[in-house]
Image (tube, rainbow, N blue to C red):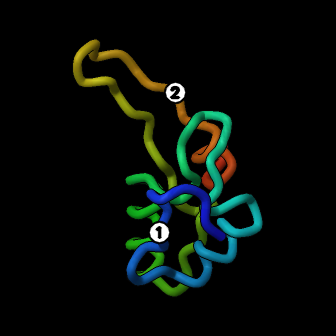
Amino acid sequence: MLCGSKWRYHRKSSSRIKTHGEQIGLGTKTECDNIFGDCAEFHAANDLMLKSSRLKAKDIDILGAWHPRSNKPVGRCDNCTNMFGSEL
């Protein structure tokens, strides 16, 4: 599943996050103009799931981000909402 030259699977992927991601569009460019699965949140979740065999994507809480220049919160993108659920 490829979309654009930027997309690549993490060099070592958790089969659980890869399967979950493929069900909801892993590797596709989405409305928020990001490639689903090629972001820091996805890679961090993958690293956590590689370390814990019982961890599931829905168990991972991705905290909100802050824009460094404006010091204002940045809303969760559609990709993270689809993968990890709505913001806390």
Task: Name which residue type carries label 1.
Answer: Arg
Which kind of residue does numbered mark 2 sit on? Answer: Gly
Residue 56's x, y, as percent?
60, 71
Check the image and report above or below for 81 versus 76: below
Q: Tag 2, which secondary structure?
A: loop
Question: Looking at the picture, does residue 57 appear above or below residue 85?
Answer: below
Q: Is residue 68 left or right of residue 51?
A: left
Q: Quadrant of the N terminus?
A: bottom right
Is residue 88 shown to the viewer in this render? no
- Residue at 39% in and 33% down: 65
Q: Position of residue 64 (x, y in %)?
A: 44, 35
Q: Which of the labelled discs sits on residue 75, or is there none?
A: 2
Residue at left 71%, top 59%? 25
Q: Residues within 10 Å of mark 1 (few under 14, many from 20)?
A: some
Q: Are there few (<14), some (14-19), or many (20+) residues within 10 Å of tag 2?
A: few
Q: Nearer the viewer, residue 73 or 31?
A: 31
- Residue 60's label in the rendered image is none
Depth check, mark 1 against mark 2: the one in front is 1
Question: Of the residues under marks 1 and 2, which one precedes in the sequence?
Answer: 1
* Residue 9 at x, y percent in the picture: 48, 73
Q: Is 68 in front, or is 2?
A: 2
- Residue farthest toward the top in the current orientation of the protein: 70
Q: Secondary structure at mark 1?
A: loop
Direction from residue 23 to residue 34 in the image, left or right: left
Which residue is painted at 66% across and 47% down in the image? Answer: 85
Report which residue position mark 1 lands on.
Answer: 8
